[in-house]
Amino acid sequence: MLLLDEPTNDLDIPTSKFWRKAFSNFAVPLCSSRTIAFLLDRVSTIVLGFDGFGRAERFVDYSQWEAWQEEQQAAQVR
């Protein structure tokens, strides 16, 4: 497992492209502490999203997890 802490902060475009290509060929779990939708949508096959309350769900991409988060937050407001 590769753990990354804010992996795309302050990267120039060529460096960002390099890491995106490198992660695409990386065949182990990748855990990032920062939401990096652009990178996740291009290199991941499964997104494991946490809700902050001890629950996690599997998603096909970041946007699906983001929509789930919005639904969870709307349900809490009601």
Image: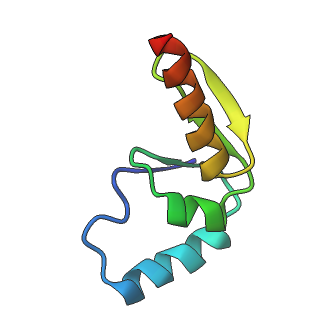
- The x, y position of residue 57, in whole percent, is 68, 29
- Kindly identify the residue that appears in the image at 39 percent across and 48 percent down: 34
Identify the colour scheme used.
Answer: rainbow
41 to 5, vertically: above or below: below
Q: Residue furthest front?
A: 78
- The x, y position of residue 29, in whole percent, is 63, 49
56 to 75, vertically: above or below: below
- The x, y position of residue 24, in whole percent, is 65, 71
- Kindly identify the residue that appears in the image at 37 percent across and 85 percent down: 13
- Kindly identify the residue that appears in the image at 48 percent across and 83 percent down: 18
Q: Residue furthest bottom?
A: 14
Front-lying residue, 49 or 68: 68
Where residue 52 sits, quadrant-wise, is: top left
- The x, y position of residue 16, in whole percent, is 42, 78
Image label count: 0
- Answer with left or right where residue 52 lies relative to residue 20: left
- Kindly identify the residue that appears in the image at 68 percent across and 52 percent down: 61
Front-lying residue, 54 or 73: 73
Q: Residue furthest left?
A: 10
Front-lying residue, 67 or 52: 67
23 to 65, vertically: above or below: below
